[in-house]
Amino acid sequence: MKKFSLIVMMLFLITSFSSCVNNDKEGKVAEKKEIKKARSVGGTSEVLLITQNENQWNGQMGQAVRDFFEQEQYGLPQPEKNFKVAHINIDAFNDMFKKHRNLIIGKINNEIENPLIETQKNWMSEPQYVIRITAPSEESWIKIFESQKDELKLMFDQNERERFQEFFRPTTDTKIVSRLKKQFGVTMNVPEGYFIGIDKDNFMWIRKETDVMSMAFLIYELPYKSTSDLDPENIIRVRDSIVNKYIPGPTDGSYMTTDKEFITPTSKTLPDFPAGYAVETRGLWNVVGDFMAGPFVSYSIVNPENTKIVTAEGWIYYPNKDKRDLLRQQESILYSLKFVE
């Protein structure tokens, strides 16, 4: 570990030195050159675990990582894992694998007394998160992993969002962004391929339609009266009234609503959401009077410039197909939402 710390310190000093602005003999400021790192590799929602040997992968260390990261993602109609955990041993850890987007490097070193977790962003590529867990025994390795696993998952979730945001940013539909800015005072990097289906009464339905799939964003704004407006029950009640009014079903009398039996909606607060304090809601929508359903995720944020709540939601209809990665795409786009200053 001392050796690794020394290497990290040397890299830090080299990076700091190279980023400084130098003056030439005439006193002119030299241009600072940015070194672009390689693009990270790896499948969507994939974690690569590096172990010292097969026994660690097949034993309790590997099992602890698989049991956590390969849990079913909540809010999807068919079972899908949060992440897929792939594996190689350290002797196969070459330059290609070092560019993997989400890395966990496990090591047992009986010469140290206490376990240690180190995190590093954009080590050999970008976007990339590297998590090094070193411990004197497998038991202590598992213990420290279990104590920090939720925070580690948040890092990998963020990394997946950053990858999609980087991919979609160059194709942002400027016309949709302009309409969002005018209607709600927000920007959001909606990529090409979507179109505005409805834009009225402080409500916007942004759609993407193919022969086999529908994807959509809903943006709506309501007065903010008290903190109870952000209660999960109220958010669902408002959602149901909005989609009942604006999202028709395929047959007469059918309409969209929020499923409350098959998958109960779940909510959590996000103090560090990019646009400000937000409440995230996940669940399943369905159509009353028809056999349509799919996942949704929404973010309700109080506009700091006025007394309004803006809710931005993404939902998918893709029957009998996996939807996890599509929902991650929509989540990353929703995370690009910002209020216009």
Image (cartoon, rainbow, N blue to C red):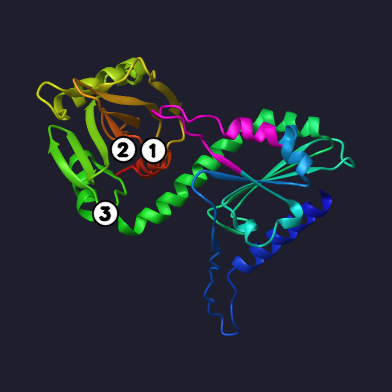
**Range of the magenta residues?**
62-85
Upstream in sequence: badge 1 or badge 2: 2
Residue 173 in the image: state x and y as whole percent.
25, 54
Q: Nearer the viewer, residue 21 or 312?
A: 312
Cα separation, mark 3 vs mark 2, equals 19 Å
Instruction: Say which residue appears at 26% left-offset and 39% top-offset.
Output: 216
Q: Decide whether residue 270 is among the magenta residues.
A: no
Which quarter of the figure has residue 8? bottom right
Cα separation, mark 1 vs mark 2, equals 7 Å
Task: Say which mark, if any, is on residue 192.
Answer: 3
Q: Please state which amino acid type lies under the numbered disc 1.
A: Lys
Q: Is residue 150 above or below residue 31?
A: above
Cα separation, mark 1 vs mark 3, equals 20 Å
Q: Nearer the viewer, residue 303 or 110?
A: 110
Q: Are marks 1 and 3 in contact (CB under 8 Å)?
A: no
Upstream in sequence: badge 3 or badge 2: 3
Residue 329 visible somewhere in the drawing: yes
Instruction: Say which residue appears at 11% left-offset and 21% top-offset.
Output: 253
Q: Quadrant of the image for the C terminus?
A: top left
Figure label count: 3
Q: Is residue 272 left or right of residue 193?
A: right
Disc number lying in front (1 or 3): 1
Q: Decide whether residue 77 is among the magenta residues.
A: yes
Disc number lying in front (3 or 2): 2
Q: Secondary structure at mark 1?
A: loop
Q: Is residue 208 left or right of residue 72?
A: left
Q: Please state which amino acid type lies under the numbered disc 2.
A: Tyr
Task: Say which mark, if any, is on residue 318.
Answer: 2
Q: Please state which amino acid type lies under the numbered disc 3.
A: Glu
Residue tagged 1: 323
Q: Are marks 1 and 2 in contact (CB under 8 Å)?
A: yes
